[in-house]
Amino acid sequence: MDKKILILVIVLLAITGLAVLEVATGALSALAFDQITYNYSAKVWIPPTHPEDPNAGSLGGYYKIDGNGRDFNFFLQLTGAEKSESPLDYTADGLKGTGRIDQIKVTPGTIYALLSRDVKGAMFNTTFKGNMNLTCAAWTGTTTFGNDGQTFGGNFTIDGVMTDWVGTYTLKREGLRILGVSDFIYYPNNQISKAKKVQKTYYL
């Protein structure tokens, strides 16, 4: 009888310990997530910067995320953007990124969204932090991002041949779409005193 009680106590302590570990760090969620292979793509639309201008055009394309567990690849292609952009800023090869999820924790909202086949809902209900390296045309960049259950956003830096960018972005769910708002500055290399401020809105 004493052995059964001891085993029961050990099992209860183990379960309690795992529960505390899960609440504290999301370790079990991360372990499960590390086994998942995924591949997701969707359309992206960037409205005109000045919609009141009849000659202003919008940009459209698609983005793709694929990976295994915490490590993932990102790709964005904007159809025809290379025709109006400098080859130093954007080419038909698109924007590529490699990233890693540093911390992740699945919530009840994540599970409900996945059972409902709501990928966007799962993304917004999961808490996580991560980082990504970016390359496009002649520039390179880095971004850190995260979702704490209240705010989904991040910051970025871009090192271009002639111009640098620094900014933040926030993503919000708006019906069936994702609204992105980015606030950033850009300036000639190493001349931050000449920075200009911009806010850009886009839909995913």
Image (cartoon, grey):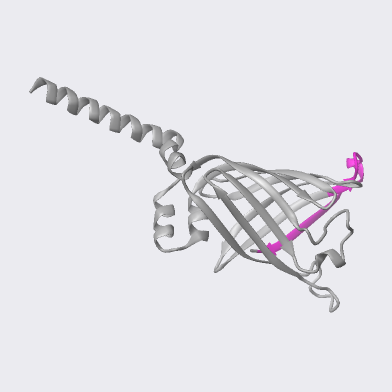
In percent of width and height, residue 180 lies at 66, 59
Find residue 158 and report its image quarter.
top right
The one of 22 and 175 positioned closer to us in this rendering: 22
Residue drawn at point x = 74 percent, y = 55 percent: 95
> Is residue 180 one of those drawn in magenta?
no
State whether residue 28 appears in this view: yes
Which residue is farthest top? 2
Which residue is farthest left? 1
Q: Determine whether 18 is above or below 179 in the image.
A: above
Q: Assign the magenta stretch its main secondary structure.
A: strand
Quarter that holds the N terminus? top left
Q: Determine whether 160 is above or below 39 in the image.
A: above
> Is residue 195 one of those drawn in magenta?
yes
Q: Is residue 31 left or right of residue 146?
A: left
In percent of width and height, residue 42 lies at 61, 65
Residue drawn at point x = 86 percent, y = 67 percent: 83
Q: Is residue 8 left or right of residue 106?
A: left
In percent of width and height, residue 112 lies at 39, 57
The one of 198 and 110 positioned closer to us in this rendering: 110
Start-end of magenta stretch: 186-203
Residue drawn at point x = 80 percent, y = 69 percent: 80
